[in-house]
Amino acid sequence: MDELHETLRKYYGYSSFRPGQERLIRAILTGNDVLGVMPTGAGKSLCYQIPALLLSGLTIVISPLISLMEDQVTALKKRGIPAAFVHAAMPGAERRALFMRILEAQRTGRRNSVRLLYVSPERLMTREFLSFSENASISLLAVDEAHCVVSWGRDFRPAYRKIGEFADLLKRRPPIAAFTASATPEARAEIITFLHLKDPESLTTGFDRPNLFFEVRHTEDKWAELLRVLSGHKRGSGVIYCLTRKTTEALAKKLNINGFPSAFYHGGLEPGVRAKNQEDWIRGRVRLIVATCAFGMGIDKPDVRFVIHYNMPGSMENYYQEAGRAGRDGKPGDCILLGSARDVTINRFFIRKAGSGWTGEDLPHAEGPMTRHGERSSAPGPVSGAQSPSQDALRRILRQDLLVMQDYVSCHTCLRAFMLRYFGEEAPPFCGKCSVCLSDTGPLPRGSTLIPGVESEELYKELRSLRLDLANRQGKLPYEIFSDRTLHDLAAVRPESLKEMALVEGSGLINVLKYGSVFLAEIRNWVDTH
Ligand code: ADP
Ligand code: MG
């Protein structure tokens, strides 16, 4: 697996980049200036943090607010990435000690010292900071909230206009990477001018793919459902994503027997076989390719007409990226997810294995989230000595990802809106081009009556938000109160007393006694109003 994905997995626990991230990161790494315009929540920070991990020198991040710097530095340290920030309230001695520490580490070639240093724009041009910068090796200048340079903007900060000058004062001008969520062309032009960006790689992401149709189908008979889908897609190339290697092979075989010429693809195949199967599909010798998530990286086949998920993937990032391989040519593409309860079980299994050094090889047919970029744990990280996130932290992230997918699959509001909002974009409540919007009932307004069976999912969500409140108030982590699984069972069983509640697997007597009554009240209230 390439270095970028390796780093993403190791420090962040994410398995894929979000739209635009990889391109910006690569541009930075080749020494280009960049301007990334991405909506809030799209993941701009990662675009300079990953280069900071991979470049040899220090990355200076210019950020307008102490609170932002503090949040980021805390988050980075949690991920095992050494980072620091300097601010006005910091005693001079402490500041100087920090600078000394960085310079000393650079001199002795230690890489486990501060990789990212956050500063306010005002600090850059102070004599102290200039003399530090003259002596330091600086590989990248990242400018967060770059719209602060825009004179007519609400957030204008004159000191942002000195950043370009600061860069020019350095021994070697490092690349400047500017990020903002302000998308107007005027703002972009001002940013380029006043930050002195040189021929920057500019990228503006919006997440919507208007030519794609999204659908979720619930079924316990995937094969029958797949045949139904295929009978509606008699033309064009398609990808069928599965969660395990074994499924890809078995399914391709069955499809071939039933008159649907198909190739299969997964990470366990000999490179030669893999390349040949992929080639067969790209050249159109077969119309279908049945694959695990290992498939798709770097494949740019424009005329894919449909992407079918035979299993529910483990995260929205994965889903959107995989589904997004349909319709690259701008013509219609269908993205159909076949979901079943068992998919949740398979994903949970992957999560239990995650971070345990398991690469999928001892489990020959699985392609869990950890196998995608396999082999990662033994490779020396770019920051030796820094800790990568713990297994528990990683599993927590993966569990959250899975919950989002479960929510998506059981969603009764516009599917496109669900996804766009997840990625931080605004979206109207009705797209008219997804299975929910086109259903007889259309998207359900919040709080309307749901069909039975989905109800426990709804109650589960209520219980989850109750648990989150409770956890926040008690300074605990949600799962320390009740696990997701227990909440699911509580939502399905709906106990009426503490005694009944204690019978639910995993609830734990102590926690039932501590928190049970709050949950009972919520369940009772919910039952009464539904
Ligand atoms: P922005 O600065 O664009 O508003 P952030 O950099 O704060 O966004 O990122 C928003 C959230 O998205 C963070 O929680 C971050 O960890 C998460 N994120 C970023 N990139 C990815 C990715 N590739 N996969 C999953 N989550 C991501
Ligand atoms: Mg940000």
Image (tube, grey):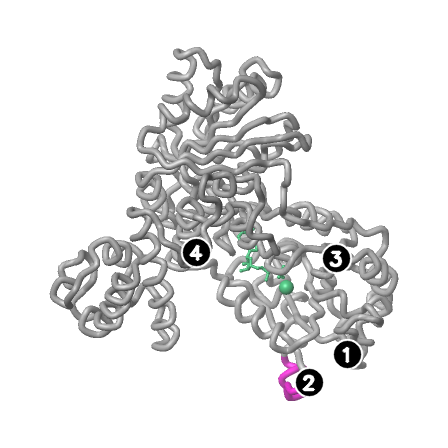
Residue 204: x and y, percent? Answer: 72, 50
- In the rendered structure, which segment of residues is drawn in magenta? 88-97
Q: Nearer the viewer, mark 3 or mark 2?
A: 3
User: Residue under circle 1?
Assistant: 122
- Type of amino acid at the residue the image marks with label 4: Ile
Q: CA distance from mark 2 to mark 4?
A: 35 Å
Q: Earlier in the sequence, mark 2 or mark 1?
A: 2
User: Residue under circle 4?
Assistant: 397
Q: Earlier in the sequence, mark 2 or mark 4?
A: 2
When the figure is inspected, residue 145 is found, relative to residue 423, above or below; the finding is below
Q: Earlier in the sequence, mark 1 or mark 3?
A: 1
Disc sitting over residue 5 in the figure: none
The residue at the far left in this view is: 499
User: Residue under circle 2?
Assistant: 88
Residue at 45 percent across and 25 percent down: it is: 229
Q: Nearer the viewer, mark 2 or mark 4?
A: 4
Q: CA distance from mark 3 to mark 2?
A: 31 Å
Callout 2: helix, strand or loop? loop
- Type of amino acid at the residue the image marks with label 1: Glu
Callout 3: helix, strand or loop? loop
Q: Nearer the viewer, mark 1 or mark 3?
A: 3
Magenta span includes 93:
yes
Q: Residues within 10 Å of mark 3 (few under 14, many from 20)?
A: some
